């Protein structure tokens, strides 16, 4: 499927509501379970997505669109949320994520990006040259990755409860060695 | 995490709304893409979940609760939805799934299951002896598995669009050999 800005935005705008529906008001046991040490719980995922809104996708797009002499992105801190959200509730994080995402999509819409602008370059600190189009596609995939992760991590909390069903439920044995 | 009927029901009741939020009104390109031959698109997943409501979880629970001489479940047809839903829209399937799920959760609630009843046995046609508790836990995990699948399958539609980001987005290389 070729990149399409409207089809991308339509996925990006749904993510806060999808996570609200899946997680809002859910018991702590579902929200705080992870897949192992150094892996994300659903609570962590929402914090990580907030970090993305504040430090990753739109800030990097701004660097590209500045067409300045330094197109190199700031490195992204995957664990920024850990210290940031110690005393926060999931409800407040879901609300904050929804607000940040809506504002960022407003910024994106305001740019009225042309096909030529989508091909403008930036420099990822470890991946090297990328285009604005690739950055925006990665934003969409990153959302979907973390929705899938939330569902997978929740499923694994019941791994010992399904008895002989484990081989019929591959989500329970996905990422036995954490991949992200 | 130990099985808990209320915590299970709270996940089961969210699935139709989660899928509605993620998929309702989305472009056909997002809805109809799959991961390869014989794998499910998001459209297929919703049809498969409907099949589960009609032929799998509650019908199997009824067999267990009947305490009859034949506790063997009917085999489950993973491709029943293919022929059933040829001319259906995703919107109508999402609506139907929501109605079936709500009715089935009403049945479940009406049973007022006791801890002893949760240990009652059934016979899975290929997995052998299972309990009602394991069946209900598998229902929850099965929902979460397919939410994860929908997000993963959607993400893969942009695999060629993210350029060098592929190694940082493991969802794009999960299930390269289909597992379900």
Image (tube, coloured by chain):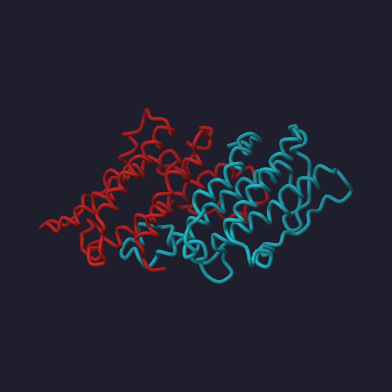
Chain colours: A cyan, B red
Foreground pick, B35 / A114: A114
Q: Is residue A129 above or below residue A27?
A: above
Q: Residue furthest right?
A: A69
The x, y position of residue B12, in whole percent, is 39, 52
The x, y position of residue B30, in whole percent, is 53, 37
Which quadrant, please, contains the C terminus of chain A? bottom right
Q: Is residue B129 above or below residue A122?
A: below
The x, y position of residue A106, in whole percent, is 71, 39
Foreground pick, B80 / A143: A143
Is any part of residue B131 visible from this angle? no
The count of marks equals 0
**With B143 as the anchor, is B164 left or right in this view?**
right
Residue plotted at (68% across, 41% down): A105
The x, y position of residue A13, in whole percent, is 61, 41
Which quadrant, please, contains the N terminus of chain A? top right
Q: Is residue B167 above or below residue B94?
A: below
Image quarter of residue B46: top left
Q: Residue furthest bottom?
A: A37
Is any part of residue B121 visible from this angle? yes
Residue plotted at (27% across, 50% down): B58
Q: Residue furthest top?
A: B87
């Amino acid at each position: 499927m070729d990149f399409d800005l409207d089809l991308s935005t339509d996925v990006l705008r749904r993510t806060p509501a999808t996570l609200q529906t899946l997680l809002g008001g859910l018991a702590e046991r579902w929200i705080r379970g992870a897949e192992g040490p150094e892996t994300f719980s659903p609570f962590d995922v929402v914090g990580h997505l907030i970090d993305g809104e504040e430090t990753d996708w739109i800030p990097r797009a701004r660097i590209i669109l500045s067409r300045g002499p330094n197109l190199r992105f700031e490195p992204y801190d995957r664990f920024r949320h850990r210290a940031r959200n110690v005393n926060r509730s999931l409800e407040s994080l879901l609300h904050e994520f929804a607000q940040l995402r809506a504002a960022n999509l407003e910024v994106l819409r305001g740019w009225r990006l042309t096909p030529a602008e989508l091909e403008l370059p930036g420099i990822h600190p470890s991946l090297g040259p990328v285009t604005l189009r690739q950055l925006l596609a990665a934003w969409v995939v990153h959302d979907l990755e973390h929705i899938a992760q939330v569902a997978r991590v929740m499923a694994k909390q019941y791994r010992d409860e399904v008895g002989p069903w484990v081989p019929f439920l591959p989500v329970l044995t996905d990422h036995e060695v954490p991949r992200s």
